[in-house]
Protein backbone atom coordinates (compact mmCIF):
# COMPACT_ATOMS: atom_id res chain seq x y z
CA UNK A 1 0.00 0.00 0.00
CA UNK A 2 1.08 3.61 -0.54
CA UNK A 3 2.25 5.37 2.60
CA UNK A 4 4.61 7.89 4.16
CA UNK A 5 7.54 5.91 5.57
CA UNK A 6 10.00 6.95 8.29
CA UNK A 7 13.26 5.05 7.88
CA UNK A 8 15.27 6.48 10.79
CA UNK A 9 15.39 9.12 13.53
CA UNK A 10 15.52 12.69 12.30
CA UNK A 11 14.85 11.65 8.71
CA UNK A 12 11.85 13.12 6.87
CA UNK A 13 9.38 10.49 5.63
CA UNK A 14 9.47 9.28 2.06
CA UNK A 15 6.48 8.31 -0.05
CA UNK A 16 6.51 4.71 -1.14
CA UNK A 17 5.13 1.20 -0.76
CA UNK A 18 4.76 -0.24 2.74
CA UNK A 19 4.09 -3.91 3.39
CA UNK A 20 0.38 -4.62 3.20
CA UNK A 21 -1.40 -6.19 6.16
CA UNK A 22 -4.84 -7.34 7.27
CA UNK A 23 -6.69 -6.58 10.52
CA UNK A 24 -5.79 -8.75 13.46
CA UNK A 25 -8.41 -10.24 15.73
CA UNK A 26 -10.40 -7.47 17.39
CA UNK A 27 -9.13 -4.74 15.05
CA UNK A 28 -10.85 -2.50 12.52
CA UNK A 29 -9.43 -1.56 9.14
CA UNK A 30 -9.65 2.17 8.40
CA UNK A 31 -9.32 3.40 4.83
CA UNK A 32 -7.70 6.75 5.51
CA UNK A 33 -8.89 9.91 3.78
CA UNK A 34 -7.17 12.65 5.86
CA UNK A 35 -4.34 12.77 8.41
CA UNK A 36 -3.07 16.00 9.97
CA UNK A 37 0.60 16.81 10.43
CA UNK A 38 0.84 17.67 14.13
CA UNK A 39 3.69 18.48 16.50
CA UNK A 40 3.06 15.10 18.13
CA UNK A 41 3.40 13.27 14.82
CA UNK A 42 6.60 15.14 13.98
CA UNK A 43 8.01 14.49 17.46
CA UNK A 44 7.28 10.76 17.37
CA UNK A 45 8.71 10.49 13.84
CA UNK A 46 11.93 12.24 14.87
CA UNK A 47 12.22 10.18 18.06
CA UNK A 48 12.20 13.30 20.24
CA UNK A 49 8.73 12.91 21.80
CA UNK A 50 8.52 11.05 25.11
CA UNK A 51 6.01 8.58 23.63
CA UNK A 52 8.21 7.57 20.64
CA UNK A 53 9.37 3.94 20.54
CA UNK A 54 12.05 4.44 17.83
CA UNK A 55 11.35 1.22 15.94
CA UNK A 56 12.01 1.72 12.22
CA UNK A 57 10.71 1.69 9.54
CA UNK A 58 7.17 2.77 10.33
CA UNK A 59 4.28 4.82 8.96
CA UNK A 60 3.91 8.14 10.84
CA UNK A 61 0.60 9.61 11.97
CA UNK A 62 -1.07 9.09 15.32
CA UNK A 63 -4.59 9.78 14.07
CA UNK A 64 -6.79 10.69 11.13
CA UNK A 65 -10.19 10.40 9.50
CA UNK A 66 -11.40 7.59 7.28
CA UNK A 67 -13.98 4.90 6.67
CA UNK A 68 -14.44 1.52 8.25
CA UNK A 69 -15.23 -1.49 6.09
CA UNK A 70 -18.94 -0.91 6.75
CA UNK A 71 -18.69 2.64 5.37
CA UNK A 72 -18.88 4.44 8.73
CA UNK A 73 -16.89 7.68 8.81
CA UNK A 74 -14.71 7.91 11.91
CA UNK A 75 -11.88 9.73 13.57
CA UNK A 76 -9.28 7.20 14.71
CA UNK A 77 -6.26 7.37 17.01
CA UNK A 78 -3.25 5.25 17.97
CA UNK A 79 -3.16 2.71 15.12
CA UNK A 80 -1.23 -0.52 15.59
CA UNK A 81 2.44 0.09 14.95
CA UNK A 82 4.04 0.17 12.48
CA UNK A 83 0.87 1.16 10.59
CA UNK A 84 0.34 4.87 11.29
CA UNK A 85 -2.33 7.17 9.92
CA UNK A 86 -0.44 8.44 6.88
CA UNK A 87 -1.22 5.52 4.61
CA UNK A 88 -3.99 4.25 2.39
CA UNK A 89 -5.18 2.11 5.28
CA UNK A 90 -4.37 1.41 8.91
CA UNK A 91 -5.54 -0.84 11.73
CA UNK A 92 -7.01 0.23 15.05
CA UNK A 93 -8.78 -1.01 18.14
CA UNK A 94 -12.51 -0.25 17.66
CA UNK A 95 -12.50 1.66 20.96
CA UNK A 96 -10.01 4.09 19.39
CA UNK A 97 -12.60 5.33 16.89
CA UNK A 98 -15.24 8.03 17.32
CA UNK A 99 -17.91 9.12 14.83
CA UNK A 100 -17.33 12.25 12.75
CA UNK A 101 -20.44 14.47 12.60
CA UNK A 102 -22.00 15.05 9.20
CA UNK A 103 -21.40 18.81 9.37
CA UNK A 104 -17.59 18.42 9.40
CA UNK A 105 -15.59 17.50 6.31
CA UNK A 106 -12.70 15.05 6.58
CA UNK A 107 -9.92 17.64 6.37
CA UNK A 108 -11.44 19.94 9.01
CA UNK A 109 -12.15 17.07 11.40
CA UNK A 110 -8.59 15.73 11.06
CA UNK A 111 -7.13 19.20 11.60
CA UNK A 112 -9.25 20.06 14.64
CA UNK A 113 -8.82 16.81 16.55
CA UNK A 114 -5.41 17.16 18.16
CA UNK A 115 -5.24 20.92 18.91
CA UNK A 116 -8.89 21.04 19.99
CA UNK A 117 -8.49 18.02 22.25
CA UNK A 118 -5.59 19.66 24.08
CA UNK A 119 -7.76 22.28 25.78
CA UNK A 120 -11.00 20.26 25.88
CA UNK A 121 -9.31 17.43 27.81
CA UNK A 122 -7.39 19.87 30.02
CA UNK A 123 -10.54 21.76 31.00
CA UNK A 124 -12.77 18.71 31.38
CA UNK A 125 -10.49 16.12 32.93
CA UNK A 126 -7.63 18.00 34.61
CA UNK A 127 -8.88 21.45 35.62
CA UNK A 128 -12.50 20.26 35.89
CA UNK A 129 -13.75 23.71 34.92
CA UNK A 130 -16.86 24.98 36.71
CA UNK A 131 -19.26 27.37 34.97
CA UNK A 132 -18.38 31.00 35.57
CA UNK A 133 -14.72 30.44 36.47
CA UNK A 134 -11.89 32.59 35.13
CA UNK A 135 -9.44 30.95 32.72
CA UNK A 136 -6.04 32.34 31.70
CA UNK A 137 -4.62 30.87 28.48
CA UNK A 138 -0.86 31.31 28.19
CA UNK A 139 0.17 31.16 24.54
CA UNK A 140 -3.24 31.82 23.06
CA UNK A 141 -2.03 33.10 19.70
CA UNK A 142 -0.98 29.67 18.41
CA UNK A 143 -3.32 27.23 16.69
CA UNK A 144 -4.16 25.31 19.88
CA UNK A 145 -4.37 28.46 21.98
CA UNK A 146 -6.84 30.14 19.65
CA UNK A 147 -9.06 27.08 19.76
CA UNK A 148 -8.69 27.04 23.56
CA UNK A 149 -10.27 30.49 23.81
CA UNK A 150 -13.38 29.39 21.91
CA UNK A 151 -13.52 26.06 23.77
CA UNK A 152 -13.21 27.67 27.20
CA UNK A 153 -16.08 29.99 26.33
CA UNK A 154 -18.18 27.08 25.04
CA UNK A 155 -17.51 25.05 28.20
CA UNK A 156 -18.74 27.82 30.45
CA UNK A 157 -15.78 30.00 31.45
CA UNK A 158 -17.06 33.26 32.90
CA UNK A 159 -13.96 35.28 32.04
CA UNK A 160 -11.06 34.48 29.68
CA UNK A 161 -7.63 36.12 29.74
CA UNK A 162 -5.26 35.44 26.82
CA UNK A 163 -1.51 35.98 26.55
CA UNK A 164 0.72 35.96 23.49
CA UNK A 165 3.47 37.70 21.56
CA UNK A 166 1.67 38.28 18.27
CA UNK A 167 -0.16 41.52 19.03
CA UNK A 168 -2.46 41.47 16.00
CA UNK A 169 -3.56 37.90 16.68
CA UNK A 170 -3.89 38.66 20.39
CA UNK A 171 -6.31 41.50 19.63
CA UNK A 172 -8.36 39.25 17.32
CA UNK A 173 -8.96 36.80 20.18
CA UNK A 174 -11.56 39.16 21.59
CA UNK A 175 -13.80 38.10 18.69
CA UNK A 176 -13.44 34.47 19.85
CA UNK A 177 -14.40 35.22 23.45
CA UNK A 178 -11.32 36.62 25.22
CA UNK A 179 -12.28 39.30 27.75
CA UNK A 180 -8.74 40.58 28.31
CA UNK A 181 -5.34 40.15 26.70
CA UNK A 182 -1.78 40.39 28.02
CA UNK A 183 1.05 40.90 25.51
CA UNK A 184 4.18 38.92 26.36
CA UNK A 185 6.47 41.75 25.36
CA UNK A 186 8.25 42.76 28.56
CA UNK A 187 7.67 45.14 31.44
CA UNK A 188 3.91 45.51 31.27
CA UNK A 189 3.34 41.77 31.63
CA UNK A 190 4.02 41.68 35.40
CA UNK A 191 1.67 44.54 36.24
CA UNK A 192 -1.08 43.03 34.06
CA UNK A 193 -0.66 39.63 35.73
CA UNK A 194 -0.76 41.21 39.19
CA UNK A 195 -4.06 42.91 38.42
CA UNK A 196 -5.76 39.82 36.99
CA UNK A 197 -4.59 37.50 39.76
CA UNK A 198 -5.73 40.00 42.38
CA UNK A 199 -9.17 39.86 40.78
CA UNK A 200 -9.01 36.06 40.81
CA UNK A 201 -7.91 33.39 38.31
CA UNK A 202 -9.18 29.84 38.70
CA UNK A 203 -7.53 27.93 35.84
CA UNK A 204 -4.38 28.46 33.79
CA UNK A 205 -3.88 26.57 30.51
CA UNK A 206 -0.19 26.82 29.65
CA UNK A 207 0.98 26.14 26.08
CA UNK A 208 4.40 27.77 26.48
CA UNK A 209 6.17 26.92 29.76
CA UNK A 210 9.46 28.84 29.95
CA UNK A 211 9.71 32.36 31.36
CA UNK A 212 6.07 33.32 30.86
CA UNK A 213 4.87 30.29 32.82
CA UNK A 214 7.28 31.13 35.63
CA UNK A 215 5.95 34.71 35.73
CA UNK A 216 2.37 33.44 35.88
CA UNK A 217 3.13 31.01 38.69
CA UNK A 218 4.93 33.68 40.70
CA UNK A 219 2.12 36.18 40.13
CA UNK A 220 -0.43 33.60 41.25
CA UNK A 221 1.59 32.86 44.37
CA UNK A 222 2.13 36.52 45.27
CA UNK A 223 -1.08 38.20 44.24
CA UNK A 224 -3.77 35.55 44.12
CA UNK A 225 -6.45 35.81 46.84
CA UNK A 226 -5.45 33.86 49.96
CA UNK A 227 -6.67 30.28 49.92
CA UNK A 228 -8.15 30.45 46.40
CA UNK A 229 -6.89 27.45 44.45
CA UNK A 230 -5.35 28.08 41.03
CA UNK A 231 -5.32 24.96 38.83
CA UNK A 232 -2.30 25.39 36.56
CA UNK A 233 -2.46 22.88 33.67
CA UNK A 234 0.74 22.43 31.64
CA UNK A 235 0.02 21.40 28.02
CA UNK A 236 2.92 22.49 25.80
CA UNK A 237 6.47 23.78 26.03
CA UNK A 238 7.00 25.97 22.98
CA UNK A 239 9.03 28.47 25.05
CA UNK A 240 11.33 25.96 26.76
CA UNK A 241 11.32 22.68 28.62
CA UNK A 242 12.55 23.88 32.02
CA UNK A 243 11.93 26.69 34.50
CA UNK A 244 13.49 27.66 37.82
CA UNK A 245 10.62 27.90 40.29
CA UNK A 246 11.17 28.89 43.93
CA UNK A 247 9.82 26.27 46.30
CA UNK A 248 8.15 28.98 48.36
CA UNK A 249 5.87 29.79 45.42
CA UNK A 250 4.08 26.49 46.00
CA UNK A 251 4.27 26.49 49.81
CA UNK A 252 2.84 29.98 50.11
CA UNK A 253 -0.11 29.52 47.77
CA UNK A 254 -2.92 27.16 46.83
CA UNK A 255 -1.56 26.51 43.34
CA UNK A 256 -2.27 23.03 41.99
CA UNK A 257 0.34 22.24 39.31
CA UNK A 258 -0.54 19.46 36.85
CA UNK A 259 -0.06 18.36 33.26
CA UNK A 260 -2.44 17.28 30.53
CA UNK A 261 -1.47 14.90 27.74
CA UNK A 262 -0.76 11.29 26.89
CA UNK A 263 -0.26 9.57 30.26
CA UNK A 264 -1.84 12.18 32.51
CA UNK A 265 -5.22 11.76 30.78
CA UNK A 266 -6.41 8.24 29.96
CA UNK A 267 -6.81 7.31 26.31
CA UNK A 268 -10.58 6.78 26.71
CA UNK A 269 -10.88 10.31 28.15
CA UNK A 270 -8.71 11.76 25.37
CA UNK A 271 -10.84 10.05 22.74
CA UNK A 272 -14.03 11.07 24.52
CA UNK A 273 -12.80 14.66 24.53
CA UNK A 274 -12.18 14.52 20.78
CA UNK A 275 -15.63 13.06 20.15
CA UNK A 276 -17.31 15.76 22.27
CA UNK A 277 -15.22 18.51 20.68
CA UNK A 278 -15.96 17.39 17.10
CA UNK A 279 -19.67 17.11 17.87
CA UNK A 280 -19.66 20.67 19.25
CA UNK A 281 -17.31 22.19 16.66
CA UNK A 282 -19.94 24.04 14.61
CA UNK A 283 -21.96 25.19 17.61
CA UNK A 284 -18.83 26.40 19.42
CA UNK A 285 -17.51 28.17 16.31
CA UNK A 286 -14.28 26.17 16.22
CA UNK A 287 -12.31 27.05 13.11
CA UNK A 288 -8.84 26.22 11.88
CA UNK A 289 -6.87 27.16 8.78
CA UNK A 290 -6.02 24.06 6.75
CA UNK A 291 -3.85 23.25 3.77
CA UNK A 292 -4.82 19.96 2.11
CA UNK A 293 -1.78 18.26 0.56
CA UNK A 294 -1.75 14.93 -1.31
CA UNK A 295 0.16 12.32 0.71
CA UNK A 296 2.37 11.78 -2.31
CA UNK A 297 3.88 15.23 -1.57
CA UNK A 298 4.83 14.33 2.02
CA UNK A 299 8.57 14.80 1.50
CA UNK A 300 8.15 18.43 0.37
CA UNK A 301 5.42 19.33 2.88
CA UNK A 302 6.86 17.71 6.02
CA UNK A 303 8.97 20.69 7.06
CA UNK A 304 6.64 23.48 5.91
CA UNK A 305 5.75 26.27 8.35
CA UNK A 306 2.34 25.51 9.86
CA UNK A 307 2.24 28.02 12.71
CA UNK A 308 -1.04 29.52 11.52
CA UNK A 309 -2.91 26.31 10.74
CA UNK A 310 -2.57 22.64 9.93
CA UNK A 311 -1.24 20.72 6.95
CA UNK A 312 -3.53 17.78 6.29
CA UNK A 313 -2.42 14.93 4.05
CA UNK A 314 -5.19 13.54 1.89
CA UNK A 315 -5.65 10.20 0.16
CA UNK A 316 -8.11 9.61 -2.67
CA UNK A 317 -10.56 6.74 -2.40
CA UNK A 318 -12.71 6.71 -5.57
CA UNK A 319 -15.39 4.59 -3.91
CA UNK A 320 -16.20 7.28 -1.32
Image: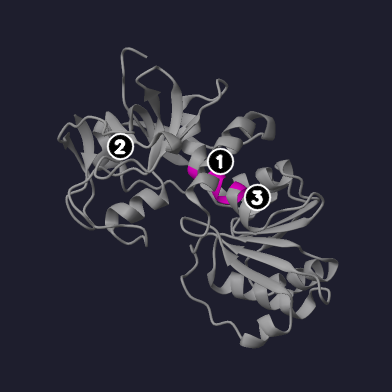
Query: What residue does disc 1 label?
Result: 272
Few, some or many residues within 10 Å of mark 1 (<14, 14–19, 20+): some
- The disc, 2 or 1, on the residue closer to the chain's N-terminal end is 2
- Mark 3, mark 2: which one is toward the viewer? 3
Residue 88 lies left or right of residue 248; in this view the side is left
Circle 2 packing at 10 Å, graded few (<14), some (14-19), many (20+), is: many
Q: How many marks?
A: 3
Q: Principal SS element in the magenta part?
A: helix
Q: Are marks 2 and 1 in contact (CB under 8 Å)?
A: no
Q: What residue is shown at x 67% (from left), y 82% (from top)? A: 249
State left or right for residue 104 relative to residue 64: right
Judge whether residue 236 can be spotted in this image: yes
* First to last magenta residue range: 114-120
Is label 1 in a helix, a strand or a loop?
A: helix
Q: Which residue is mark 3?
A: 124
- Say above or below: 8 vs 309: below
- Quarter of the image with the C terminus in it: top left
Res. 36 visible in picture: no
Q: Earlier in the sequence, mark 3 or mark 2?
A: 2
Front position in the image: 263 or 110: 263
**Against 315, is 169 above or below?**
below
Q: Which residue is mark 2?
A: 86
Which of pointers 2 and 1 indicates the residue nearer the eye?
A: 1
Q: CA distance from mark 3 to mark 2?
A: 29 Å
**At x 18% / y 54%, what residue is drawn?**
8
In the rendered structure, the answer to whether residue 124 lies left or right of residue 11 reads: right
**Farthest residue, direction top:** 319
Amino acid sequence: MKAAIVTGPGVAPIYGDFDHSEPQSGEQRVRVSAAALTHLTRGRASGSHYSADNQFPFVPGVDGVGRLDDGSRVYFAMPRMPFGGMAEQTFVDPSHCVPVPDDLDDVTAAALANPGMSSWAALRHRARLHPGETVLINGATGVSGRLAVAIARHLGAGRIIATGRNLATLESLKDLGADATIPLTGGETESDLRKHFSDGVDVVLDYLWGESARSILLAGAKFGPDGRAIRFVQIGSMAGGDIALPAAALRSSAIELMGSGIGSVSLPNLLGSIGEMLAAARTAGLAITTEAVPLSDVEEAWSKDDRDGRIVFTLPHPEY
